[in-house]
Amino acid sequence: MHETLLRNIKAWGAELGFARVGVARIDLSADEAHFLEWLQQGFHGEMQYMQRHGVKRTRPAALVPGTVSCISVRMDYWPAAAADAAAVLADESVAYVSRYALGRDYHKLLRHRLQQLATRIGAAIGPFGHRVFTDSAPVLEKALARNAGLGWIGKHTNLIDKDAGSYFFLGEIFVDLDLPADEPASAHCGSCSACIPACPTGAIVAPYRLDARRCISYLTIELKGSIPEEFRRAIGNRIYGCDDCQLACPWNKFARPSEEQDFAPRHGLDRAALTGLFAWSEAQFLAKTAGSAIRRIGHERWLRNIAVALGNAAPAQEVIAALRARADHSSALVREHVLWALRQQELKRSTADCGPQD
């Protein structure tokens, strides 16, 4: 019965837009040791939620009593219509937004699809114990996805599928069903370490070891206060997240563009001028980020991040004017980063003025 059910679950998942569906056993004891050591090193920074629930993150049955198996799914997000990532990163006048965040917030979309899958299972077998997750609770999702055969955890700590790269979201359904488990994925990074030097801030401190405190995604999204000055120049024009380690990964030559229209770029955020975004009022920010993952950082941090990017831009009157317009902002956090950016602009202008003369 369960073999037939598993085949049906995978077929239903495909119909719902999941690129891969697998089933994992829930023993994560080896991953738990690695995770606890990572916490002990303080690599989680201000993300206190990473340790708040103790070992519930690594013990699914402690989080949801009765859990026996985990249905793990993958949904590709790379937006085919987006401007070329490398070209955007090379243009100091425009903003780089991590490609996963250009469209609709994935949390609601995946959660809805997962619930639809759970509903179909219930319609086939009757009521069963389950709970749906999409980056929404203490779940060690990459380890579970690896155990479900969806890919291996690369040296940059992202999940990689040898047939599809790493540009995808993960979701889970914890179930009280003893489903046949898939074979865990084997690792295929080999001697490649392209992702490690690709990180602008050196956040990948060793293979399979990420210091989130140095990661641009953490600095621009999770960190609530001031961005340490030592990392500001390396941030470049990245105003929300970072894809550099994935862009450097050779396996992403197999990445598949998403067929989900909800992940297509909105409001031109795949290549928007920094000065234009910096001029958004809070009302404009809220309106233009409605339904987007970007909204979670709020307008204050949005301005903080863009101020850093403007400081890193080539010196221009338009940039200086945009910064000066925010120099007396009500937020001390914004004012601090604007002042830093203006100093960077002045330094670049003075350096250019002192350059070789004809």
Image (cartoon, rainbow, N blue to C red):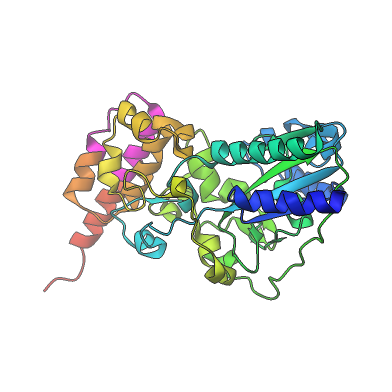
Expressed as whole percent of the image width and height from the top left, the position of residue 143 reads 75, 52
In the image, is 22 to the left or to the right of 159?
right
In the image, is 348 to the left or to the right of 301?
left
Residue lying furthest top in this view?
Answer: 330
Q: Is most of the magenta stretch helix, strand or loop?
A: helix
In the image, residue 134 lies in the stretch drawn in magenta: no
Picture quadrant where residue 82 is located:
bottom left
Identify which residue is drawn at 45% across, 38% down: 294
Expressed as whole percent of the image width and height from the top left, the position of residue 346 reads 25, 49
In the image, residue 324 lies in the stretch drawn in magenta: yes
Residue lying furthest bottom in this view?
Answer: 191
Magenta range is 323-342
Q: Is residue 116 visible?
A: yes
Expressed as whole percent of the image width and height from the top left, the position of residue 158 reads 64, 56
- In this view, the residue in front, 53 or 115, is 115
Above or below, 185 relative to 45: below
Identify which residue is drawn at 70% across, 39% down: 120
- In this view, the residue in front, 93 or 345, is 93
Above or below, 350 relative to 280: below
